[in-house]
Image (spheres, grey):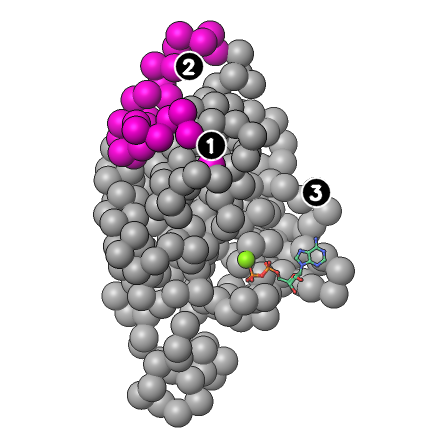
Amino acid sequence: MNKMVEIKDFSIRLGNFELKNINLDIFDNEIFAVLGKTGSGKTVLLESVAGFYRRFSGNVNIQGKSVVDVPLEKRKIGFVYQDFGLFPHMTVSDNIGYGLKIQKLDKQKREKKVAEMAEILSIGHVLNQYPGTLSGGERQRTALARALVLDPKMLLMDEPFSALDPATKQSMYKQIETIHQIFGCTILFVTHDFNEAQIMADRIGIMVNGELRGIRKSVNLFESCQDEEINNFLWGNSRGVKNAV
Ligand SMILES: Nc1ncnc2c1ncn2[C@@H]1O[C@H](COP(=O)(O)OP(=O)(O)O)[C@@H](O)[C@H]1O
Ligand SMILES: [Mg+2]
């Protein structure tokens, strides 16, 4: 299997927080979830993979190249932010087409691509609306469309479903599966939701205090191991009762 991402001995300090000695390979077309409590460093890890930081030790390679050595527009990484990060003063259509405009694609081609993407994500009917008028699910779909229209080889998503109600979550899980099939992209997402990680991911890594430990297949998520902190995270202090999320 080819590696999409190779994280080797990666450490980064931000204020009092440190992401410590991360080692992780993510394979082409894999869906990988990073699971951890709030404050464990999930967002910092995702941003590090996207190449947002400069001062670190170790390496993050994407398809064999150090991510920070590749110019932003050539990285082919789609990023979906926790709060979706839509531009409030732009219509859905302009939000989705924003990256294409930056790439100087002409208006006609842009509109065609935006319409195609909106069709796939079932948001064709809201293209002229502003983000403030959308439901949570429509916002999420718009954020995904904006990332996917640039044809990324990798999609990074930060707690993508945490703001959605249970029914919308379920339909978004299916949507992501479809997207994964259509686009064949590798997906790395972070979540604090055990169930979500298991439903969506091939493998899961558990983040504890800035360390990525307990990497396992998602079907084996609740297997106990030698690492008591991981066991406590998964099972709580009394065995047999899962932590509430
Ligand atoms: N730029 C920064 N400067 C200083 N501290 C930071 C910065 N970014 C994140 N942190 C700290 O790093 C820790 C981990 O943050 P984060 O990755 O956002 O956690 P998670 O996403 O798992 O909830 C937090 O304590 C946060 O306050
Ligand atoms: Mg976070």
Which residue sits at x=63%, y=50%? 58
Amino acid at pointer 1 = Tyr
Q: Is residue 223 left or right of residue 189?
A: left
Q: Secondary structure at mark 2?
A: helix
Amino acid at pointer 3 = Arg
The residue that disc 2 covers is 110
Q: Could you say which disc has been placed on residue 54 in the image? A: 3
Q: How much space separates mark 2 and mark 3, taking CA atoms?
A: 32 Å
Q: Is residue 207 left or right of residue 44?
A: left
* Classed neighbour count for the residue bearing mark 3: other residues with Cα under 10 Å, few (<14), some (14–19), many (≥20): few
Q: Disc 2, disc 3: CB below 8 Å?
A: no
Which residue sits at x=63%, y=41%? 52
Q: Viewer-proximal residue, 212 or 152?
A: 152
Ligand 1 occupies quarter:
bottom right
Magenta range? 105-131
**Is residue 148 among what the camera can see?**
no
Which residue sits at x=40%, y=35%? 142
Q: Position of residue 11 (x, y in %)?
A: 65, 57
Please name which of the two marks, 2 or 3, marks the residue nearer to the observer.
2
Q: Could you say which disc has been placed on residue 69 in the image? A: none
Q: Could you say which disc has been placed on residue 130 in the image? A: 1
Which residue sits at x=39%, y=10%? 109
Q: Secondary structure at mark 1?
A: loop
